[in-house]
Amino acid sequence: MTKSVVQEIGVLVPTFKEEKIVILFGPQAPKELRELAVIHEFETLTKEPLKEGGTIQFGEESFTITALGTLANHNFEELGHISIYFQEPMEEVLPGAVFAAPHHFPTIEEGTIITIK
């Protein structure tokens, strides 16, 4: 199980609510990306935590991973970065993308625990 804690929420994060996209980045995210990202810090990180059929929880809200790109695990492990789309997968899944259901934007605040199983 991978566990992370939300440290900071960029000022532009709410603008992605309508598109149902959450961009996660680790604490080393550059300044220009911090505005549009949810900055989190790993408490525990397992190897290749993201998998189809697995779950991502934001606090008590649970989402099932329906598709993921070829670089999602690598980017997540190295940079803490993934883009989570709470919508149906596109025909071509971008390398760092993760798709999850149900299709609604999660409630995220500073201190929210993100759990991936």
Image: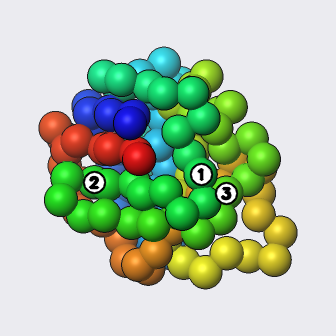
- Residue located at (31% from left, 44% from top): 114
Instruction: Residue 17: name its quadrant.
Output: bottom left
Q: In this view, does 108 lie above or below 90?
A: above
Residue at position x 50%, y 68% in the image: 100
Front position in the image: 73 or 97: 73
Q: Position of residue 31 (x, y in %)?
A: 48, 27
Are the two marked residues, 3 and 1, in contact with CB atoms closer than 8 angstroms? yes
**Sequence-wise first label, 2 or 3:** 2
Q: Residue furthest top?
A: 28
Q: Which amino acid does label 1 sit on?
A: Lys
Q: What's the distance in space between the residues labelled 3 and 1, CA to CA?
A: 7 Å
Amino acid type, residue under disc 2 in the picture: Phe
Q: What element carries label 2?
A: strand
Q: Taking the image as drawn, is residue 25 in sight?
A: yes
Bin the neighbour count of mark 1 within 10 Å (Cα to Cα): few under 14, some 14-19, many 20 and up: some
- Cα separation, mark 2 vs mark 3, equals 18 Å
Q: Which residue is at 41% across, 47% downward?
A: 117
Judging by the rendered image, the residue that carries numbered circle 2 is 58
According to the image, label 1 marks what residue? 51
List the residue tagged with mark 3: 68
* Image position of 91 (left or right of 98): right
Nearest the viewer among 30 and 69 is: 69
Residue 35 appears in the picture as rendered:
no
